[in-house]
Image (spheres, rainbow, N blue to C red):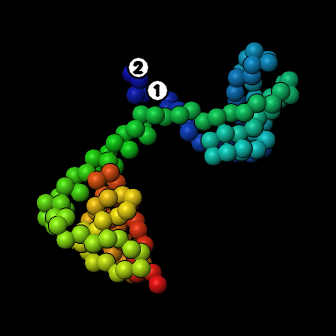
Amino acid sequence: MSDSAETPEVYVLPKVATNFYYDCKKCGKETFHVVLAHSAEDSAKLECEICGSKKTYKLPKNPARARTKKASVRSSAASAWAMYDKKIGSDEKIKYKMTENYEVETAIDHIKFGIGYIKSATSGKIEVVFQDAIRLLVHNRS
């Protein structure tokens, strides 16, 4: 059987007050544990039903998935930025101020993120393409 046909890892915490099959170090085997509480987004407090020992369960990390998403976001932002830079250019950039009103396809100079190009604009927010990411910024605030 190939690796892709194996059961995928679960990346969701079990519900509070449910039984969860988990390895107990004190008992030396896998036993049922009761989920007492969720202590964080990725961890829960468990109690062994056999020996009563308490432990913290943490969700396994999936670095491959996180790395792939981050890399694709960076590459798409960089390619969009290059396209806007070629199309609009940064010669007539405007200093970003959240009190100003901005139009689509305008070059702005942000104090922290650098030069960016406005991709879309609504009454209160603008979507700006920077070299490293696409960000939502406020505008037209009084």
- Residue 76 relative to residue 111: left or right: left
Residue on which the image places disc 1: 6
Q: Amino acid at mark 2?
A: Met
Residue in front for this viewpoint, 15 or 93: 93
* Residue 81 x, y percent position in the rendering: 23, 57
Q: Amino acid at mark 1?
A: Glu
Label 2 and label 1: CA atoms lie apart by 8 Å
Q: Quadrant of the N terminus?
A: top left
What element does badge 1 sit on?
A: loop
Could you tell me which residue is drawn at 41 percent across and 68 percent down?
137
Which disc, if any, is residue 1? 2
Could you tell me which residue is drawn at 83 percent across and 27 percent down?
53
Residue in front for this viewpoint, 39 or 9: 39
Residue 108's image quarter? Answer: bottom left
Are there few (<14), some (14-19), or many (20+) residues within 10 Å of tag 1?
A: few
Residue 134's image quarter? Answer: bottom left
